[in-house]
Amino acid sequence: MRNKFLNLFVEILCSIFLSYLISCNRKFEVPPAYIVPDISANTSIRALKAIHHPGGYEQISDDLIIRGIVIADDKSGNFYKTICIQDSTGGITLKLDAVNLYISYPVGREIFLKCKDLWLSDYGGLIQLCTLDKSVPANPSATGIPAVLLDNYIIKGRLGNPIVPKQVAISEFNDSLQSMLIQIKDSVQFIAADTAKQYADTTAAKNSVSRTVISCAGNKAIVYTSGYANFAGVLTPAGKGLLAAVYYVYKTTPELIIRDTSDARLTAARCGARDIKLVELKNLYKGTDIFPGAYVISGIVISEPSNISPGNIILQDGNSGISLFFGSAAPTNRFVPGDSIRVNITGAMLTSYKGMLQLNLSAASLPAAALATKKNIIPQEITIDQLFKNIALMENTLVRISKVIISTDAGPQFSGNRTLTDATGTSNLYTAGTALFASSLLPVICQNIVGYGNRFNSGQIQIRSLDDLTPASGCILHYPFHALYDFSAVTTSSGTTDPTPVPVSKNINFGAFTANGISANPSAAARFSFTGWPTGATNGSEDFTGNLNTAKYFEVTITPSTGFLLDLSSLSFILQRSATGVRQWAVRSSLDHFTTNLKVSLETANNNILIQSGLLFQITDRTLTGAQSGCTLVFGDAFKQIKNAISFRFYGFNAESGSGTFSLNSVTINGTVN
């Protein structure tokens, strides 16, 4: 009986439980079907952006509507109060005064934007759509669309729209890409100095940071990351691969803004680098800075670390050499002359530094050690003149110059700039104050020298140690000169001798200009101008009746120092006359006792001056009174190896009146003293 009642009780409980289950099996609410918003675009993003003028503010007064897909939101924190949208024509940044925008406007959402009453502006060149704060009328500023008004302007569309980044090479970057999602065509990697570094600052300052990526072809771009990004503390990947980012610009600098680290899929092995000869590398330079690409160079170090600026190495490969700069803090002093090294120059910039070809590299590119030591390079036998005539090919290669003298005029020690002279010319010999031999005394006798030449504004040669100098004999010194007479101290009462200090050059004495047989004082200041010349010309006529008077002339004398020989190469001057002045001029020298006119020419075309029979300057009669340049004498073999004083006389004749003038200015004499 007890079991019967127990079984009945169980049956009742089961019936109640089953009824409960049946009653709980009700249907959940089904979300409403997506309703396409009753709105469509009537303009494109590109057309909208075209309204904007750089640096200005434009309010949109028409009922313009654009449609776009959100390609960047604020979920990672790398965009703040901002979303970016794009259509098939371009992209634009929307400035919104709200946070957590990714909830309503996530990446992939279609939106329609009613643009009327909004403003176009730019920040550092980046065009954005915003509202305008005009509380300071003289200085309006762009502000975000207020959060309470977002629904008035933004109509949400379908979610989950696919986004395909635009494929772009770094070399193709341009402003039409602003606010668009792009993917760099070529594989890229962070440069060595920015590899395994935090994307941005994670300290309390939360500074934004720029990191550099480089393609395997050597093109570079900036990846810019906010310190507020939730991935700021993540380390940049060490590999190469595909990089997607939103294209921004700040002033003239393109900036790539990644949305999160999934945009940087750099997991493959880094770009490989192939060997390149220095001569090939140097030939890539065409006058503007370039990034050569993924290459490795090899060579022998020819610079001594104490006699070169910190961070520099001079490397020679065959008959080509180049300066390498790894940054002033790089420990380049680990390498000495004769060390063989290989350098990966991927990401390096090939540039001209003060006229010298140089590779600028990161400190991380400096090799850890030499491949071999005490390697020998045989210097090329050459003269100073040959070196600097061929400096583009020969700079930073070892050369040997025979029979040179090092001047002690600037001091008795090596340190600093000293003049080095051989029979063909002169060069600066530079020694750093840090050189191990900087305080050593200069040799006072003829030397043979081994070193390397380069351009540091002007030509210079450097040696590695005192072992690069060996005694020699039979030096023939060659001192070029460029003497200029500018008559700057001449006045209308300074008499017949030019009071201006004469030019100064080594082993030659320059005399002052004198006027002979003509007026007692100059007719003008700051040039050698006199009256009283022979007449014989008529205004407007090419007929001349006068002749050169050997008693009326300007004269100048130059004298080589005792034991030296003078080689003259050219003489040039500016001539000038008054309206009735001299029409013809001739120049003679003391080599033939002023008997014949020297051959004359025009260095540059001057239609106001004629050359008559190759021996006279003649001015065309156009009442010309201005200074006439280009008058030149080029000297031949007769004016070489002159051991005594030589004088030149300038004769003016066929003036139109006795009060007419003939003047000289900027007389330049070029040559060498041996």
Image (cartoon, rainbow, N blue to C red):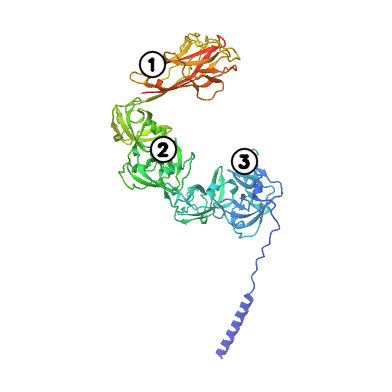
Q: Residues within 10 Å of mark 2 (few under 14, many from 20)?
A: some
Give the mark, 2 or 3, whose residue is nearer the N terminus.
Answer: 3
Q: Residues within 10 Å of mark 1 (few under 14, many from 20)?
A: some
Per the model, the C-alpha gap separating discs 2 and 1 is: 40 Å
Residue located beneath label 3 in the image: 55
SS at badge 2:
helix
Residue 393 numbered tag: 2
Picture residue at 64% right of the left edge, 76% below the top: 23
Q: What amino acid is found at the position of numbered circle 3 in the picture?
A: Gly
Per the model, the C-alpha gap separating discs 2 and 3 is: 48 Å
Q: Quadrant of the C terminus?
A: top left
Q: What amino acid is found at the position of numbered circle 1 in the picture?
A: Ala
- Position above or below: 407 against 11: above
Most foreground residue, 272 or 119: 272
Please say if the residues under marks 2 and 1 sit with CB atoms less than 8 Å apart.
no
Residue located beneath label 1 in the image: 645
- Position above or below: 478 against 229: above
Instruction: Give the left or right position of residue 10, taking residue 274 as reference.
Output: right
